[in-house]
Structure formats: structure tokens, C-alpha cells
Amino acid sequence: MDQAPDRLIIFTRLPQAGLAKTRLIPALGAEGAARLQSLLAERLLARAQRLAQDMPLAIEVRLTDGTMEEGQAWLGPGPLYSEQGAGDLGQRMERALGRALAQGVARVVLAGSDIPGLDREILAAAFAALRDHDLVLGPAADGGYYLVGLSRPTPGLLSPGHWRTLQAVAQRAAELGMSRALLPKLHDLDTPADLARWQAHLESK
């Protein structure tokens, strides 16, 4: 039987005004914050789809605050769709990663949709790192992480108390005997300060 293709899981939120990018509502308004949420997710999906032209890759979109049907109406019929389900973010991420590996995927990467700098090259580097590492992490400038990828099942990696920061995940990985690789550090786009930084970056190009 052919091995399942690598999988990229995108965690995102349906772009509903008042629910999406709430920390940016003071700067953009509820509708503007929702439009930004939509733009970021659409950009990441387009970059992933370009990567899928160069390697066997399945793309899965996992939603919160929305159904699979709503996700498909928003982003189109190409990706797989599922709901993130119950639990804290760590539990939802671990469940998504573990399910992909249980389905025969050799390398699975999960990324958030709110990182403007997460491009095709960094996604490709994440999958490449998993050829000879158990874990790959994308450090975020705020001390968190924008991406986590696995090449083997590791229950408990993102358990409560271990998933919130890059340092905590790295420490837990060391306890579990996992080999690790790090990607370039990137900025989230969650706050007005992040928005100002991104706008300055765009204007400098």
C-alpha cells in the first residue's frame, strides 16, 4: 500500500466579525479584523497549495467557530476540512497531529494562520527537518510558536502545562527523548503593535 502523503494542518478560525482577531478590533473594527483573519488564512493556504505542486502533500484545515461546510464555502473545495473539537489548544493540536500519524502519515506539520512571514520556503523546511528529527518547531517572537511538526506519535508532548510556550514544549520534548529542529523566528499578527510592525515591513519593500 502506498504511504499517505505528508500533511499540513492549518488551524484557523472562521472570519466572523466580533469573533475573529478580537485584539485588533480597536484598531480595525470588527469587520476589518475579520477581513484580516480571512486574508491571512487565504494567503497561507495559497502558499501551501504552491508547495503541494512540488511534493506529495495533503492540506487539512481545522476550524474553530465554524463548520466544515462553512470552511469549504470560504476557502474552497481543495483541502480536507474538520473541526478542532473540544479542549484547550494543546489538546486540540495533539489530537490533530496524532490522528494524522495514526492514518499513516509519515510527517505532519501544524501551523496557525496568523503569521504573515510563514511562506512556502519555511513550510518546505519544516517537512525537510522531519526527515531526520522527531519534532520541528517554529519559534514566535513572543515566546510561543507558530508551527509544530512530528514524524512519530508522541502522546503527552502538548499536555496541559507543556504546550503554551516554545520553551515548555522543548523541555517536554527533551524529557520524551525527542530530537528537535528549529525554524526561523517569526512574528504573530495579533495586536495593534504587531499590525504596525507588519505595515512598516510592507511599506519598506
Image (cartoon, rainbow, N blue to C red):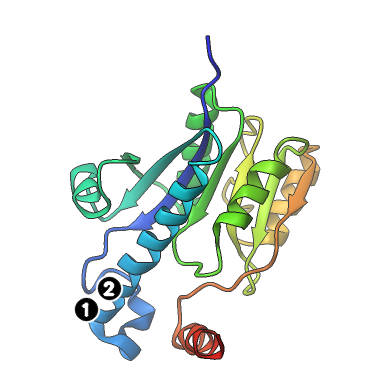
Looking at the image, residue 28 sits to the left or right of residue 119; the answer is left
In the displayed structure, 148 sits above or below 101; it is below
Looking at the image, residue 28 sits to the left or right of residue 67; the answer is right
Label 1 near label 2: C-beta < 8 Å?
Answer: yes
In the displayed structure, 55 sits above or below 138; it is above
Residue 127 vs residue 89, the one in the foreground: 127
Q: How many marks?
A: 2
What amino acid is labelled 1 in the image?
Glu
In the displayed structure, 68 sits above or below 112; it is above
Residue 126 vs residue 99, the one in the foreground: 126
* Callout 2 crowding tier (Cα within 10 Å): few <14, some 14–19, many ≥20: some
Give the spatial CA distance, label 2 vs label 1. 6 Å
Name the mark on residue 41. none
Quarter in which the C terminus is drawn: bottom right
* Callout 1 crowding tier (Cα within 10 Å): few <14, some 14–19, many ≥20: some
- Circle 1 residue: 31
Looking at the image, residue 31 sits to the left or right of residue 177; the answer is left
Residue at the location (30% across, 86% down)?
A: 28
Residue 167 vs residue 122, the one in the foreground: 122
Q: Position of residue 53 (x, y in %)?
A: 48, 41
Residue at the location (53% across, 14% down)?
A: 2
Q: At numbered mark 2, what does the secondary structure look like: helix, strand or loop? A: helix
Name the mark on residue 35. 2
Q: At numbered mark 1, what does the secondary structure look like: helix, strand or loop? A: helix
Q: Position of residue 67 (x, y in %)?
A: 22, 46
Q: Position of residue 115 (x, y in %)?
A: 51, 67
Residue at the location (50% across, 83% down)?
A: 198
What amino acid is labelled 2 in the image?
Arg
Q: Position of residue 195 (x, y in %)?
A: 46, 84
